[in-house]
Amino acid sequence: MIEYIKGELTELTPALAVVEAAGVGYALNISLNTYSAIQGKKDVKLYVHEALVAGGRDDSFTLYGFFTKQERELYRLLITVSGVGANTARMILSSLSPVELCTVISSGNDKMLKSVKGIGLKTAQRIIVDLKDKIISLGIATELPSNAGHATAIINNDVKDEAVAALTMLGFSPAPSAKVVTAILTDSPDMPVEQVVKLALKQIK
């Protein structure tokens, strides 16, 4: 079983990355989150999910690559939900960052999930019901606020959303923007939006 592939990024599209390791080029299906995270990098490390589909003459072996373990675990959880296939799970992770997805599931925001192409209301509700407890028990939702800091975190989420929206309008991708903004607000919970954006502009790569 392949845990991760580390090597030179030789080809990259928003849906596929080719990583050369020890003379072998591995084609990995990726999400837009991962694409944004590795864009412009020469050497990368992608966590792998292997999918083997057996069925007569149509056997296929597909590799999926993820920039973080958290995103891979979320992908693996999503495909356990009835009605969510490999492409749908990848579409969800291309529309929402791992942190956003955890927040959406934990808060029961089926409207946000339903806004993802290919997701109907029943599937959105099923994802929330099936995965709400799992993301917490598996420790995937590490960025989610604990009960102790819940009030502060709600205020911070408002600031975070405004800051990410501003950065997106300035031309930056949502996933890396959200990551940088979350890190800034973790260190400085009371920082106003404009300062968060200014700081983020210096940190986003």
Image (tube, rainbow, N blue to C red):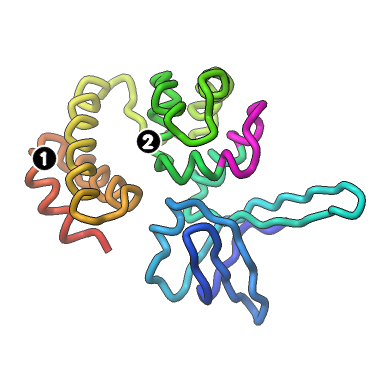
Q: Nearer the viewer, residue 63 or 190?
A: 63
Give the residue drawn at x 58%, y 39%.
88
Question: Which image quadrant: the N terminus?
Answer: bottom right
Q: Nearer the viewer, residue 185 or 170?
A: 170
Q: Nearer the viewer, residue 45 or 111?
A: 111
Residue named by callout 2: 100
Give the residue drawn at x 51%, y 73%.
9
Give the residue drawn at x 43%, y 51%.
33
The kind of residue tagged 2 is Glu
Q: Residues within 10 Å of mark 1 (few under 14, many from 20)?
A: many
Find residue 20 and report its horizontal and vertical position in percent: 59, 76
Which quarter of the picture shows residue 27?
bottom right
Query: Does the stretch in magenta take in 85?
Result: yes
Query: Does the stretch in magenta take in 24?
Result: no
Q: Regarding mark 2 in the picture, which secondary structure is present there?
A: helix
Give the residue drawn at x 51%, y 23%.
124
Residue most extreme to the right: 56
Comes first in the chain, label 2 or label 1: 2
Check the image and report above or below for 24 versus 167. Answer: below
Check the image and report above or below for 195 versus 43. Answer: above
Residue named by callout 1: 193
Find residue 74 and report its horizontal and vertical position in percent: 53, 38
Find residue 137 and report its horizontal and vertical position in percent: 53, 27
Q: Nearer the viewer, residue 35 or 140?
A: 35
Q: Regarding mark 1 in the picture, which secondary structure is present there?
A: helix
Magenta region, residue range: 77-89
Find residue 188 and report its horizontal and vertical position in percent: 15, 41
Q: Does the CB distance between marks 2 and 1 fall below 8 Å?
A: no
Which quarter of the picture shows residue 65?
bottom right
The kind of residue tagged 1 is Val
Residue 62 marker: none
Check the image and report above or below for 51 versus 125. Answer: below
